[in-house]
Every structure is written in structure tokens, then in C-alpha cells.
Image (tube, rainbow, N blue to C red):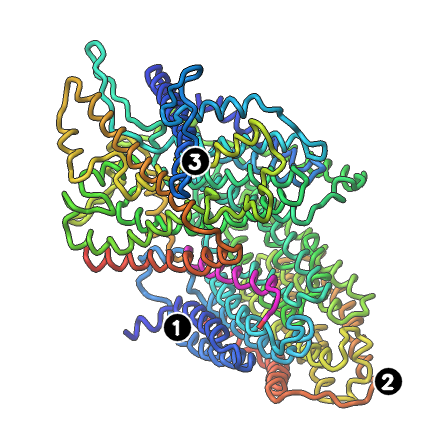
Amino acid sequence: MLAAIDLFFLVSTMVKIVFFVMVVVMTLVAYTVYAERRFSAIIQDRVGPNRVGIPFTKISLAGLGQPIADGLKFLLKEDFTPKHVNTFYYWLAPALTMVPALMSAAVVPFGSEMAIPFGDEIYRVPLVIADINVGPVFVFAITSLSVYGIVIAGWSSNSKYSFFGGVRSSSQMISYEICMGLSIIPVIMILGELNLTKIVEAQSANGWLLLPAWGNGLSMQSWLLLIPVIISFVIFTISIFAETNRLPFDLPECETELVAGYHTEYSSMKFALFFLGEYAAMIIGSGIIVTLFLGGWSLPFGLSEHLLANKGGFWGIITPLIHFGCFMSKVVAFLLFFIWVRWSIPRFRYDQLMRLGWVFFFEIALANIVLTAIIMVVLR
Amino acid sequence: MPPVAFIIFSVIMLVFGVLVVVNRNPVASALSLVVSFLGLAALFVSLDAYFVGVVQILVYAGAVMVLFLFIIMLLDLKAEARRKINVVPMIGGCVLTAVLVLQLVSVLNTFEPGKKSLVEAPLDYAAAAAARPAVPEGKSDTIKRDLRENKLPDVRLLGEQLFTKFPFHLQIAGVLLLVSTVGVVILSKRELK
Amino acid sequence: MGNFLEAPYLLEAVVVVLGLALLMLEAFLPKADKRLVAYIALFGLAGVLVASFNMKAPENLEHSFWSFYATDNLAFFYKNIAVLATMLVIVMAIEYTPVLEKYVSQGSKQGGLGEFFCLPVFVCAGLMWMASAKEFITIFVSLETVTISFYVLVAYMRRNVGSLEAGVKYLILGALSTGFFVYGVTWVFGLTGETHLEKIGIALQGLEGSDSAVLFAFTLILVGLGFKVAAVPFHVWVPDVYQGAPTPVTAFLSVGSKAAGFIVATRILQPFLEMERLHSSFTTILVIVTGATILFGNFAAIPQTNFKRLLAYSSISHAGFLLLALTCTPDQFQLTPGQVVAFYLATYLLMTMLCFLVLTIVRRSTESDEIAAFSGLHRRSPFLAFALLIGVISLAGVPLTAGFLGKFFVFTLAIDSGRWILLAFAVVGAASGFYYYLKVARAMYWEEPTELAAIEISPLARLALLLLIIATIVFGVYPAPILGLLTN
């Protein structure tokens, strides 16, 4: 309803976009890269980047300045466009990978509703950029667009390695989108809701889907439903790995076979955009997993309900901030899990990857829907 | 306000729709079609049909067109871009299109649309909620709840229609999909057993 | 319980389940002879055919399902046509196995043949749904089930360029015509706010103004239907697709698809033609299409040398005669246009299937569809030659065959409602039909064979041919059983 736009809505939305997408996600992207390098170093018994700290001093802060140095390096490098590429699409591709990843951040609720007392009135700001009724479907729709960036990059580079990377990634992403979509249907059936905010609120009151330990969650049905939920969770998480082209599914950029896959011909900031796009997609993917299965911003064991019961005063501001912290810590835990997996498991072969998606996950996800329906009908 | 959005997105749709035909490069054509679909999705969203709009992106822009693009790239249709334009069919096509457009314009001129425009006739959520049939004890009508909250529960309404009014058609569609799956496998499988 | 077993929708359900079972059988018994699938399909469909006479329309029609689903005589009649056509197509497909093996499997014996016997069963279900559809969404989904299966079936011989070309042509033009049809439906919905044909009729009666919009919608729908029934000028796909497709599929297209197109046309045209104000405009459009179809179909058939292509043009010309019946508004004649069309299609089923069955058998032994391949057929197989003779004279409309009665009813209807110009066209068309149909008879009986080896006919095909010959002759003399099904 465009008619309903008012100034407050406009301003608060802009603030939320700037805060969540620009500040939180982008910073997190930078520091995930850093964490990746440090974590991998630990796993491989190396030191990793631990030098860059405050410039012109000897303070190294365990290398926390590294992302800034990386960013500067990307910006200052020569932006080289090879002669043989299809220029327009070559330039378009990096943007097309970055934008969808950030766009899907719009529907992820990152905290409970904020109530800001201002003068006589109390302004209510839901901590989600767009509270729409089709949250998960919207996320799928937007992530399904991110494949264009990779495909176009592969095609416009006019080089066989890039092309193979592009072709591989498009078939991989399409295949796993199906598993991903099917695997969350049980979740939607159980919660009866497609609005992510409401999904989180329901979990906050009645137990997370993976931890139904309070409220209405303490029932026979919820605990039996854990079986399909765990299956969904596993398939969904693995599909997110495939969708974000992370190891063990990073065939599109598999360096042992394809040099660097679809971004072989890219350098400088354009390469960085692919890089950032991948990490942003990873963050949003973690956000969606957390929202759907682990109660989003809510604290475990019904603690959120106690917090939300405190009305008035500064509680309206403090509670959402606590919830925001809760959400972020869950997301960070997941990001570390992503990194841990990347440095522990070897890469799949391409046919194994396709077989896993089409022969196992697809069927299991379908059967899982039926299983959920049976449990729900029998234990109504 | 909606007319502005309507005009912007319709123009996007139409311009890129024309580009699909005009572009000589098949990849560019396919991508123009994607943008055209995005415009269409935006039009759906501006009509409060979020689900249809999003599904439009998910299915057409995100899956169907990716496969199209995939095939176009694999075939590497460079010859298409170099092919000379055949003048006679092109003129014929243009004339036919022009005639169709003229006909549409003339038909639309005599057509009497609904007396009220959408902007003047906002949906009355409260009345709609009150008109919902009663549900049995122990169950809640989520559509009613959403309507009371002044939200249009488009997904729920769609689902309700599909599964209570049109389940028969849904099952026929299931047979249709099965048949097309079998057909695709048969036509494209390398070795048939 | 007895009541439940009489519910008409069970017929389609059984057909779909049969198709699923066959697919499963095919998938889990890959070593078995694929023709087993065909025999089971035949057996199952025969059961459905018998059961269809037991079905009754329910007395209580309150459930919303019955507003989508017609249970009148016409619906049952067309369901029977669909099942019979499918059975004959499967018999034909069994005969066609060697050709399919050559162009589909290549290497592995009978590879990929199982589905060729399964898909017609699903098409049959679609055709049966179409027979009962009286609402646009139902019409659309069942129509698409049929059309999409046909896209696959037409291109089935995937190592044959002709078949693939036919498949692509059919796909592109079919999708285009579906687009027109759906666009027309949206216009109708926009005008009336209804998808149920009965309610559309009522809404159209009460409509004031917007005449050109109604005409526009009608024309768009007519384009879509014209494609399905092969009416000129939407016939361009017919010759190439008929020639390229595997012969059993051609027969199926020619009979099944056309029959379904006509039942849908009968039902859709009715609410429009009942609209007094625009009646004459609708009829004018229909008359123009009909005239063009009759003339083009018959005249273009004359120079053909390929029998399959000849049958394609013959299919167009028969569509013309059928459309002629639909343009009529009878004055005293006791059969309605819908019933005449149904009768004509029943006879058309018999004679066309007869021709195609003979063609399939001859094709297998001569590897050619040309009329020249039929030269001296009576010396190689008198039975086949006689069967084809009956088929073509019935198609031409020689008295004492079923085809004559079909044409006779159409002509009577035309005289009754005063369609004199169309009648003149039809007479000219029927006369030219004698020439090109009997060209085949001349080749069989008066020309020297290039080869003398006898043609083998399997017992099943022999039985089917015999039944078709008997039916063609018997119903040409004594049509009461068919008319009884229609009017009772």
C-alpha cells in the first residue's frame, strides 16, 4: 500500500537499511573474511594474519585491522579489463552477484519491535526492513536471481575456465534450490506461517523448532515433529552450502580444475564484489537458518517472553537490543560453522554433487513433507 | 500513488519486452526478458499480490530463464547475431503487431470497465473478516486474524481457494506435470533402457 | 457403496491409476517385453469402457465439483470415443514397434518403448476430462494435459528428423494458440467475472454495451479452438505434424484431439451463440472459417501423393463439415448440432482408425507412407486392401457406410437451418473427396505391385480391423445404437 507511506516510516526504514545492510552486514562480511583466514590458520596449525593493527604504531590487535587493509588493497589495485571480454556484461556481473545477497537481508527480522518514546507518543519500529507475508519465498526468489551474476560472469569473460565455472554453478544452484524450497515446507506446515517476524514470535513463545523446551513446545507433537524438523534442517543447511558455492560444493570456482572458475578474468574491486557477494550470501543464509529453525532473535527457554513483558520506559529500546545481540551471536556461530566445514571436508566430485542433490535430498525432502503431514494429522 | 508505480513498471516491462525481440544477441534477449518479468512481478506486488509477484520471480526469472540462458550459452549462438534481417517477414510482423495494437485500442475504447477504480475502492478488511464462515471449536481462522490486523492474507486466500475450491484442477495439473516429466526424460535421455 | 461406484469421475481416476501402474511396471520390470505394458493398457481401458455404461450422473449436484464437471449424454459419449480411440491407438502402436525400435531405441532392444504405450493412457484421461469440462479452468488444465502429452508423442521418434521437426512445429504453434485461448478466456472473465460456461451465458445476456470486447474475446477463443480442431486458417501445422509424427500418434491427433476439441467447442460456443444481440456476428465469423476449411481441406488434398499427408488434409476437410454443423440453428430437425457433431465424430473414429491401422501395417513392411506403396495391395493382402477400401469409401461418404450417414445428418441440418452457401461449398468439397480418396483405391486394385511378398498381420490387428470394418458397415445401415447413446 503505497498510499500508507508516511515520513516516519520512510525515515525509520532508511535508518534500518543503512544500519543493518551497510553497517552490520558489510562489517560482518569483512570480519568473516578475517575469521576465515584466522580460523583456517588455526586448523592448519599456522599463524594467519595477525599483524595489521593501528597504523604507524606497534599495536597489532591480533590482526583486526586486516580487513581494512584488504579493502584498501582491492580499491587501489589496477582495474584491468581484458580485451576479449564482452564489456557491458563483464561489468554488470559483479553487481548482479552482490545486489541479490544484500536484498534478501530486507526480510530477515533482526530484533523484536522497538518502542521509542518521543514526546507524547511512542513510535513503534519493527526491527525488520520489510515485514512482508511471504518472507521465505521472497528470500528464495531473490537468491535464485543471484545465479545470473555468476552465469553472466562466466559467459562474458570469453574464457573456457570462466565458462565452465558459470555453467557448473547455474546447474548446481538450480538443483539445490529445489531441495532448499522443499526442505522448508515442513517448517511452514508446522508453524502455519510465512511471515518471518511471526515465525520468530511463535518460536519465542512456544519453543524453537529445534529446541521445543518451553511453552506449547512441551508436547508430544512438537517432540515427534523434531524428526522431520531435523531432516529439514540438515537438508536446508547443506543446500545453503551449495547455494553459496562454499566448500565442499565450490565446484564453480574449483581452483584445482578451473583456475578460479567464473571469476578467473576478474581483478581488483570487481573481483572483490564477487568475494563479498559470496560472504554476504553466507551471512544471510545463516540468518535464514537461525530465523527458521533456531528462533531468530529470541532467547532460549522463554526468557524473551519475560523481557517482552517489561513494558514502558527504556525497556522498549533495551529489549530489542538484547534480542539483536542474541540474533547476531547465533549468526556468528553459524558463520564459524561454515568456516569450520570449509577447512575440514574435501571437495565433492561434480557428479557426486548432482547425485546428492537430485537422488537423495530431493526424495528425502519430499518424503519428509509427507512424514510431517502424517505426524500432524495423527497427533492433532 | 499506485498509478505512478504502475506506469513505471509497465514501461519497464514493455521496453524490455521490445528489447527481447529487437536485440540481436540471444543472451541479451534472454536477460531483457528477465527484466521484463521483474517488472511484471513488481506490478503484481503493487496490487498487493505479494505471493504471485514473488513466485513470478522465483519461477520465471529465477528458474525458467536461467535454464534458457544456460542452453543459449551452451549452444553459443553467435551465428544468430550475424544473420541478416529478412525484410519481408519483419515488415509483416510489424504490420500484424500494429494491427493487433490498433484493434486492442479500439476494443478498449468501447469497453466499459468497472465503475470504480482500484484506488477508490479499497478493500474493506473488517467487513471481509466478519463475512468469514465460522470455524469448528478449537481451531482458529488465520485468514480472519490477518484481516482483523488489516493485512491482506494473500497466500492463505490463494491456498484456501486452491485446496477447497479447485483441488480437482490441482490434481489434473499434477498429472500434467508427471506426463511432461516423463516426456522430457524420454526425449533427452542419452541411453534408453 | 453402490452409489459411490457409479460416480462418473471414477472413470478418469481409474485411467490415471492405470497409467501410473503401467509407468511403475515399466520402471521396475525393465527386462520384460514392453508389449506387456500395451496389453495391460488395452485390457484396463476395455474395463473402463465397459464400466462407463454403468456410470450414472448423481442426483444430488450440490457439491461444487459438479459445477465443473458435466455428466450429460454428450460427456459420456465423448468419453467412450476417447477410450476407444486410445485402445485402437495402442493396437496400432504394437504394430508400429519395429519402426519405433529403429528410431527410438537404436541399439537396445525395445528401449524407451514402454512410455510410448503409457502416455496415450494419460492422454485418454485428459480427453475424458475435456469431455466433461464445462468451466474454463477445467477446460484449460485438461486441454493442456492432452496437448503437452502430444508434444512429447509427436516428437517421440527422436532419431528421426521428421518427427523432431513435427514436434517443434507443434510445440511452438500449440503454445501460441494456447496463448490466444487463455487471453480470450481472460477477456471473458473480465467481461463477466465468471469461468463457468452456464453463468457466462447468463452474464452475457445481461451485458449492455462492450460488444466489440465480446467479439474480441470470442475471436481469440476461436483461434485457440481452431488450432485444436484444425480449422483454416489455423491449420498450417497439420500437414507437417501429421506426416512427421509416428503413425499411431497421427491417428490419435486426428481422432482424439479433434474429438476433444469439438466437445469443448460445442460447449464454449453455446453461451456465445445464445446471445441474441451478437448472434449474427458470431455466426458470420464461424461461417467464414467453416467455408475456408471445407474448401481448403478438400482442394489441397487433391494433389497429395503421400497417404499420411492426404489423411492430414482429409482431417482438415472433416473439421470443415463438423464446423458446418456447429454453425447451424436447427428449425425442425430433431438432432441438435452437438449431437450431429458427436455422431459424425463417432463414424469418423471408425473410418479414420481403419485407414491408419492399415497404413501402420503397410508402413511396417514397405517403409513408406506414399500412395505408391499401396500399389497392388490386393494381391499382397486382399484383407488389408478390402479394409482400406471400406475406410476410404466411408471417408468419401459413399452410401451404406457410416461416413455417409454422418455427412447426411450434417447436410440435413444445413438445409434445415438454411445455410445454402456453405451447403454448396460442402457439396463441392464432398465431390472432390471422391476423387482423392478413390485415388488410393485405384492404386490398390488397378496398379501393379512393386513387390509381391505377402504382408503379415498379427491376430490382434486382424481382430481390430475386422471389428472396425463390421462397425463401419453396420452403423452405415443401422445407426440406432449410436443415436440411442446420444439421445437417451
Q: CA distance from mark 2 to mark 3?
A: 87 Å
Can residue C217 be seen?
yes
Q: Position of residue C187 (x, y in %)?
A: 52, 41
What range of the chain is rendered magenta? B169-192
Name the residue nearer the viewer: A201 or A8: A201
> Does residue C169 appear left or right of residue B152 in this picture?
right
Residue at image location 43% in from the left, 41% down from the top: A140
Q: Are marks 1 and 2 on the same chain?
A: yes
> Does residue A79 appear left or right of residue A10 in this picture?
right
Name the residue nearer the viewer: C134 or A349: A349
Label 1 neighbour load within 10 Å: few <14, some 14-19, many 20+: some
Q: Are marks 1 and 3 on the same chain?
A: no
Q: Give the label, 1 or 3, closer to the camera.
A: 3
User: Which SS class for mark 3?
Assistant: helix
Mark 2 = which residue? Answer: C448
User: Which SS class for mark 2?
Assistant: loop
Q: Which mark is residue C55?
A: 1
